[in-house]
Image (spheres, rainbow, N blue to C red):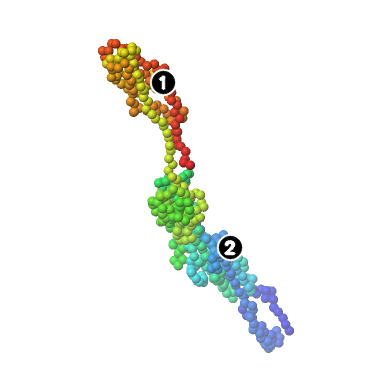
Amino acid sequence: MEGGIDLTELGLEGCFRSFMAETRSSPEPGAQLKDFVLGAFEQCQATVTTTPKDGTGNPLAADTDSDGLDEITIGTGAAGVDVTDSLNLTVEGTNTFTGTLTFFICGPITSGTCDTGGVPAGTINNVTAEGDYSSDPVNLTEVGRYCWRGYFDSNTPNLDDAFDSSTGECFEVLPVQPTLDTVAVDANGDPLTGPVDFGSAVYDKAILSGTAYKPGTDGADTTYPSIEATMDTPANGSITFTLLGPDDCSTLASGTGTNPETGVTVSDDGDYFSSGFTPDTPGLYHWQASYSGDSPNTLGASHNALCDDEEEDVTVRQIPTEIKTQQSWYPNDTATITSSVAGDNLGAGGSVVFELWDSATCDGTLFYTETETLAGGAHSEEVSTSNTTVPISTLYGDSAGTSVSYSWKVTYTPAAGDTAHTGIQSACSAEHFTITYTNDPGPGTDLP
């Protein structure tokens, strides 16, 4: 015959490794034993499969550097990066069990897995159901290779413990890629708004952002001190400023100063300035800047490698000149003194006073005066001024079309004791002039 026994109906649950069945000739306890069978049930088994996740439980980025490891990038500033471990538990052979889940993480490690030790990352007690579970978030402050371990500690007889510390539990934290932006500035650090005069220094400003602090070292686990550690030291490294030109993106600019200028020390995100460089040739120049990087910012950063950022262009111009014209000459006058009687001479002579006024009516401001002495003894005598110090241009301005009127007043006085001749004065209406000046007030016109 063939039969079966419903263990559930009998109230028997859990994991049983083996069974023994026997038959007797009758139900009495002392009846003769006929058959005796020993056998094994299908063994109860727990399986743990774990998968690294980010701090919110989302999958990590796929492998990009062909090392077989999923990836996550270290956080910026003093944040580090949070990661979790996702665990899937399955149990075969029984619907009733209990146990404890624990999580551990190791790293950075160059090889191997986290099969022992590690930093505790959470415990889940009284686990009685299959399904997905998650570790506590763990903050990592250092780049490198990390591995998780998920462990199921069974409290059910005949149900063995299970864990996963396979290579599938490993992942890598990548260095951060900072951002470096740059702009050409003046000596005050303000963006350039026009060309720079030849002979002046040019400057550059680098704006560094998105750096991560140095790894922490005060984590609770001495083997892996950067896990759950304090990040309190800003990134270092240095910025190099390079000026190229003139008029190309391959020639290192020559002049006064250091070019390239290396070693501009960095401490955290912020603005950093070159010390200034004075090119020795006019033309169009291009600034470039690069950040050396410092763990965990080892990818560094650079800007304007192709010289296509107009904010990094500097035009060093030839110093412009201006021209301004002003006409100038010295006014002079001539007077002829003549006796009105034929054959009479001027006796001992006398003096002639010349006066130049800045009006047409011999009044206002006396602009110039000069006295000349007649020799005498002649019927007629001519004398002239010899002005070489007071130009007419003294009175006019720079405006085009300025008009200025002048008049000469000339006075003859006979020599002392000469009572035979009278003095005389010229008429202003007969000797005046107006000059209209048209000068170039600047700045002039460029050469063709």
Q: Residue 240: x percent and y percent?
A: 43, 55
Extreme front residue here?
A: 343
Q: Residue 74: x percent and y percent?
A: 51, 60
Three-letter amino acid code of the residue under disc 2: Pro
* Residue 346 relative to residue 265: left or right: left
Pointers 1 and 2 in contact (C-beta within 8 Å) = no
Please name the residue shown 57% across and 64% down the image: 62
Please name the residue shown 67% across and 74% down the image: 8
Q: Which of labels 1 and 2 is toward the front?
A: 1
Q: Residue 381: x percent and y percent?
A: 32, 19
Q: Nearer the viewer, residue 374 or 17?
A: 374
Q: Earlier in the sequence, mark 1 or mark 2?
A: 2
Identify the image quadrant of the N terminus. bottom right
Instruction: Indicate the quadrant where residue 382 lies.
Output: top left
Q: Nearer the viewer, residue 163 or 101?
A: 163
Question: Residue 432 bears which disc, if any?
Answer: 1
Q: Nearer the viewer, residue 423 or 51?
A: 423
Q: Nearer the viewer, residue 351 or 62?
A: 351
Q: Secondary structure at mark 2?
A: loop
* Residue 51 relative to residue 300: left or right: right
Three-letter amino acid code of the residue under disc 1: His
Q: Which residue is mark 2?
A: 59
